[in-house]
Image (cartoon, rainbow, N blue to C red):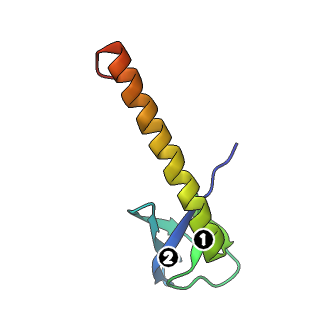
């Protein structure tokens, strides 16, 4: 299964065909080598293993990011519950 994470374009380096992205609050570089359409600052794109795979509508990106945040919160709550039940660090 592949997972592409919605990310916001913070800057574009046309000379090196790279972008700086904000992915769930983490800044990372990604390649535009697989993109055929133009990407601009403020666009939302799908990031997969260091490559921008395509653009995504802002509303859809925000819905996806909310879902990711809920999943992360659920995982953290489950880990805390396991830690508490085991009485040790995980």
Q: Return the residue nearer the eye: 35 or 57.
A: 57
Return the x and y of residue 44 as percentages of the image width and height. 57, 74
Looking at the image, residue 58 lies above or below residue 14: above
Q: Which residue is mark 2?
A: 9
Looking at the image, residue 2 lies above or below residue 85: below
Return the x and y of residue 10 as percentages of the image width and height. 44, 78
Badge 2: residue crowd in 10 Å (few <14, some 14–19, many ≥20): many
Q: Return the residue nearer the eye: 61 or 18.
A: 61
Badge 1: residue crowd in 10 Å (few <14, some 14–19, many ≥20): many
Asked whether, in this view, residue 88 is left or right of residue 19, the answer is: left
Asked whether, in this view, residue 30 is left or right of residue 83, the answer is: right
The quadrant holding residue 24 is bottom left
Looking at the image, residue 17 lies above or below residue 72: below
Tell me the quadrant of the picture where the N terminus can be found.
Answer: top right
Tell me the quadrant of the picture where the C terminus can be found.
Answer: top left
Q: Which residue appears at 65% of the width and 69% of the height?
A: 60
Q: Secondary structure at mark 2?
A: strand
Return the x and y of residue 20 as percentages of the image width and height. 44, 72
Q: Is residue 22 visible?
A: yes
Q: Which residue is mark 1?
A: 45
Cβ–Cβ below 8 Å for labels 1 and 2? yes
């Amino acid at each position: 299964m592949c997972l592409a994470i919605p990310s916001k374009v913070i800057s574009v380096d046309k000379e090196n065909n790279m972008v700086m992205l904000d992915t769930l609050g983490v800044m990372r570089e990604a390649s535009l080598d697989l993109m055929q359409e133009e990407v601009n600052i403020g666009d939302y794109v799908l990031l997969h293993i260091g490559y921008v795979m395509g653009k995504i509508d802002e509303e859809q990106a925000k819905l996806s990011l909310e879902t990711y945040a809920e999943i992360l919160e659920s995982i953290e709550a489950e880990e805390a519950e396991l830690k508490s039940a085991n009485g040790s660090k995980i």
